[in-house]
Image: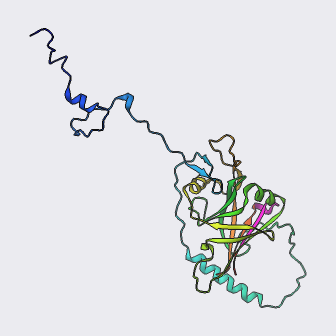
Amino acid sequence: MAIGTPRPSSLTPNTSNLFIESPLPQSPGPSSMPSPSPTRSPRIVSATPRIVSPSSGNVSPLRSPPISLEQPSNKKSRSKSSKIFRRFRSVFKSFPIINPTCKIPVSLHGSRAPEGHIHGGTRMTGTLFGHRKTRINFAIQQNPRSIPNLVLELAVPTGKLLQDMGTGLTRIALECEKQPSDKTKLIDEPIWTMYCNGRKVGYAVKREPTEDDLSIMQTLHAVSMGAGVIPTEVVDPPDGELTYMRAQFERVVGSKDSETFYMMNPDGNNGPELSIFFVRI
């Protein structure tokens, strides 16, 4: 062998290996594809659910388990029973008014008796949530483990509404214009004029539940009622803490153009009270 001639077994480079390790994009066959180098293997980063403020667009990550909420069921038996109750109530109202000897005490501050279904409606789960400095959201579910039937973005900041609820009874009236040829269900109306305790405060908007809404509902799926702060990865959020308040609501359907959601307090105590009226005029 001549001096200076490389040995094929040890010094001659492998042409196929050089071709595969070239930085240029190549498309080698699956049989000739070598195993990737450990230093060049891509990292797998798990995605974290994020809560996006609808008004400001700020993002604050939220740690939550995978979403396992159930689809709401359509129960026609309750609707039939509510129709029977409304018919009975209309007949009962036609009776003459008689002053009883023993009057039932009624509190002027909004405290109600501990019995359930006092209005003859359907009990549902309602959740108020949002960052303290942004607009509050209101979600209605059949139960804490179901997908929301209704999500509304109200026209008041979260901290302001929760503060007003702590001082006494809060009444929210949502009005929309009635169209003669429109057959849209009442709670499916897209936009509402909002009044809080008789004062016009802006507009409420109905929207479909987003992934961020479902992440919050999944985080609170074990909570039947209560209030608190949902922890996030942001230490000091610019829009304030992500707060929530969950309670049982009673849905009363007056007609196709009027519905009401009454907040129910456990044991009839003097806690926060809220009534939300939907009216189409």
Residue at image location 87% in from the left, 69% down from the top? 108
Relative height, residue 195 to residue 244 (above, below): below
* Left or right of 232, for residue 195: right
Residue 6 position, x and y percent, is: 16, 15
Q: Is residue 125 visible?
A: yes
- 55 falls in the magenta region: no
Residue 165 position, x and y percent, is: 79, 60
Q: Is residue 271 visible?
A: no
Q: Quadrant of the N terminus?
A: top left
- 270 falls in the magenta region: yes
**Furthest-left residue in view?**
1
Residue 68 position, x and y percent, is: 52, 55
* Left or right of 225, for residue 45: left
**Residue 269: which quarter of the image?**
bottom right
Q: Which residues are magenta?
A: 266-277
> For this rendering, which residue is in front, 90 or 9?
9
> For this rendering, which residue is in front, 116 or 278?
278
Residue at image location 53% in from the left, 69% down from the top? 73
Q: Quadrant of the C terminus?
A: bottom right
* Left or right of 32, for residue 129: right
